Image (cartoon, helix red, strand yellow):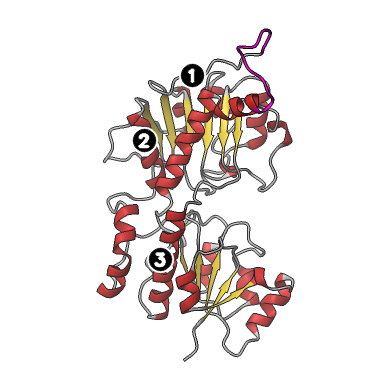
Amino acid sequence: MSSPPVLLLCRLFPGTFTDVAHRFRLLDFYASALPIHAFLAAVAAHADPPRVVLVFGGGPIPVGAELLDAVPSLRCIITVSAGTNHIDLRECARRGVQVANAGGIYSTDVADYAVGLLLDVLRHVSAGDRFVRRGLCPEQRGGDFLPLGSKIGGRRVGIIGLGSIGSAIARRLEAFGCVVSYHNRRRREDVAYAYFPTATDLAASSDVLVVACALTAETRRIVDRGVLDALGERGVVVNVARGANIDEAELVRALAEGRVAGAGLEVFDDEPNVPPELWAMDNVVLTPHQAIFTPESMADLSRVVLANLDAFFAGEPLLTRVEASEGGIPNPLPDCVPAVYDAIESVFQKTIDHSLTWCW
């Protein structure tokens, strides 16, 4: 019996997903010389067309009606991201196409990265690196000085989106002595952090604003001019969510005009394009949407994808199934067959807190 075909519309790091490649026949768009529509037409015309596709944000074709029309055999979409804003979940639900994501495997990686960005902005780490590489030294007579950095301890940090990533960020910043508060769509009864009903109220009571929410219609441009002005001229913005969670043009203006002190940006509104005004700002740290990429997470991701594939082809519930409600709120892990659950238990025990719900 031949291996089931799986359509691959995302780039994979070399050496990852070897278990998936051994078990399934990957139809890799990026290994083909065909344009996307010709490639999909060839895939759809195959005697054994794929029923599953692996995707990632920013892929070669919108993940919705256009893809499903091109390959009508598809019954399952697995994204290797935690977010699902690149997938038309309602269209998938209408057609009976199941969707799964990466679950919570990236939460600790993104949380670590968010803290790193904040430390970098406050202590001018990247700016200092550039300073040294230019051959400058403050001890030299007439040498320039970098601006004074700021301590992280005692900072009031407001987190937009206290889901699994936001909660992990909060725990890390508490260890630094920060005072954490948050804004969600609704108050959480299981945490003691101060809750603010609006992002503006949160910003007005914060020195640092960390964006860690999913991108939905409700959270698109949730950080606008009003929120930035409430944060104030000594405030710092860190975004590890999605670029469109912030009104990017307003943030650029606020930074240029000194109405906000600095920013650590891992994501952008029109990736891979970054506003050129930010390039020369030493108070801004820019990184290329790489927070999730660690060897540990890639290994966990391979196991989660493999478990979802096994569940789908066995007719079992997907392990990280996403509902059609906007924002893609993952279900808790279903009651699945013991053999499947045992295979992934170690991954999810480390990465998913079953008592938490995703808040956006």
Tag 3: amino acid: Arg
What range of the chain is rendered magenta? 133-143
- The answer to whether the residues at label 2 and label 1 have Cβ atoms under 8 Å apart is no
Lower sequence index among marks 2 and 1: 1
Q: Position of residue 184 (x, y in %)?
A: 41, 40
Instruction: Determine which residue is flagged by label 2.
Output: 172
Residue 332 seen in render: no
Q: CA distance from mark 3 to mark 1?
A: 41 Å
Residue behind mark 1: 150
Residue drawn at x 64%, y 24% as measured from the top left: 131
Q: Is residue 267 magenta?
A: no
Q: Residues within 10 Å of mark 2 (few under 14, many from 20)?
A: some
Q: Does the magenta run of residues contain 138?
A: yes
For label 2, the SS is helix
Q: Residue at x 27, y 50 (%)?
A: 355
Looking at this view, is 151 or 272 the one in front? 151
